[in-house]
């Protein structure tokens, strides 16, 4: 479900997700029908993308997305949330999302915590592009911290629900476009972030794209197991 700039979001996620995608641009009121929240009935899994919004805003579309996501999680659907999606999943599961009072933006170092399947194949410390001023201040009860840095929680999981604060899908063009659009930041800081969007930094950050393959593999395994467990009808 896309909640950000439609063109960049669609391009980036279509490129990185090796799966048949059905897309819903939620700020425009697009949302899967309620009955499709059941895992493996209409969809095998769901990815919730970034957004300019905050999950604690009282916008109707945010409440509608949160309600559908809560039902889908309860029905066993695997989820991956990225940036705003990470925050929404944490919020839906009972965690706390707050304004940081500052921006984390640019290529940053993130450290794994524990041994999450989502990060299989990634180094213990990896580079990722960040752009957010809200953050998950407290994890949902029962959720496991899987990544962090000096700004706090960078990843969590609860069962087959995963969230990452950073943007593994970003290409250099998206990173530059988003950075230039941060009107609340000084031009000096914007220029410094733009100077850091180099071929070398992007190449290092491409390691994080592995998590998309890891998530898709998990979803396919869960679907196969669910279908194999269903009784055969004569």
Image (cartoon, helix red, strand yellow):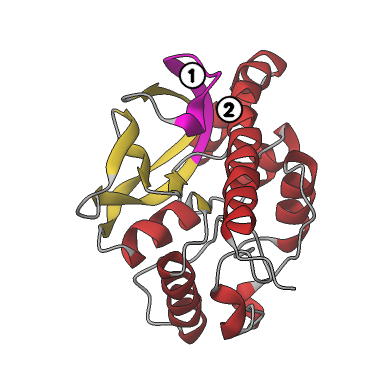
Residue at mark 2:
208
Callout 2: few (<14), some (14-19), or many (20+) C-alpha neighbours within 10 Å?
Answer: many
Quarter of the C terminus within the rendering: bottom right
Instruction: Assign a secondary structure to mark 1.
Output: strand
* Residue 55 image offset from top left, x and y in percent: 39, 67
Rendering coords of residue 228 (x, y %): 63, 53
Q: Decide which of 32, 28 is in the foreground and name it.
A: 32
Query: For the residue labelled by badge 2, is the local secondary structure a helix, a strand or a loop?
Result: helix
Residue 172 appears left or right of 190: right
Residue stretch rendered in magenta on the structure: 117-130
Report x, y in % for residue 158.
Answer: 35, 49
Quadrant position of the N terminus in the picture: bottom right
Residue shown at 44%/43% (left/top)? 165
**Residue on which the image places disc 1:** 126
Q: Earlier in the sequence, mark 1 or mark 2?
A: 1
227 or 26: which is nearer to us?
Answer: 227
- Residue at 49% from the left image edge and 43% from the top image edge: 131
Q: In the image, what residue occupies the spot 59% across and 83% down?
A: 35
| Residue 215 image-quadrant placement | top right
The residue carrying pointer 1 sits among few (fewer than 14), some (14 to 19) or many (20 or more) residues within 10 Å by Cα, namely some
How far is mark 1 from mark 2, CA to CA? 7 Å
* Residue 46 seen by the camera: no
Q: Do the residues bearing badges 1 and 2 touch, measured as CB atoms within 8 Å? A: yes
Disc number for residue 29 = none
Residue 78, image x, y percentages: 52, 54
Q: Nearer the viewer, residue 185 or 165?
A: 165
* Residue sitting at x 25%, y 63%: 94
Write down the quadrant of residue 191 in the picture. top right
């Amino acid at each position: 479900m896309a909640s950000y700039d439609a063109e960049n979001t669609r391009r980036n996620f279509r490129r990185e997700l090796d799966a048949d995608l059905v897309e819903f641009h939620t700020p425009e009121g697009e949302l899967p029908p309620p009955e499709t929240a059941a895992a493996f009935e209409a969809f095998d899994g769901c990815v919730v993308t970034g957004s300019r919004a905050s999950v604690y805003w009282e916008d109707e579309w945010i409440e509608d997305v949160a309600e559908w996501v809560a039902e889908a999680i309860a029905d066993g659907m695997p989820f991956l949330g990225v940036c705003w999606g990470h925050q929404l999943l944490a919020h839906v599961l009972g965690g706390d999302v707050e304004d940081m009072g500052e921006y984390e933006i640019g290529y940053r170092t993130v450290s794994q915590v524990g041994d999450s399947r989502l990060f299989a194949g990634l180094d213990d410390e990896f580079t990722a592009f960040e752009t957010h001023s809200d953050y998950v201040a407290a994890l949902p009860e029962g959720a496991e911290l899987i990544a962090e840095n000096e700004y706090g929680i960078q990843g969590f999981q609860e069962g087959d629900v995963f969230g990452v604060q950073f943007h593994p899908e970003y290409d250099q063009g998206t990173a530059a476009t988003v950075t230039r659009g941060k009107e609340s930041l000084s031009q000096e800081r914007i220029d410094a972030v733009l100077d850091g969007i180099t071929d070398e930094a992007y190449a290092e950050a491409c390691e994080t794209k592995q998590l998309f393959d890891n998530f898709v593999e998990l979803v396919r395994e869960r679907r196969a197991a669910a279908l194999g467990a269903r009784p055969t009808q004569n």
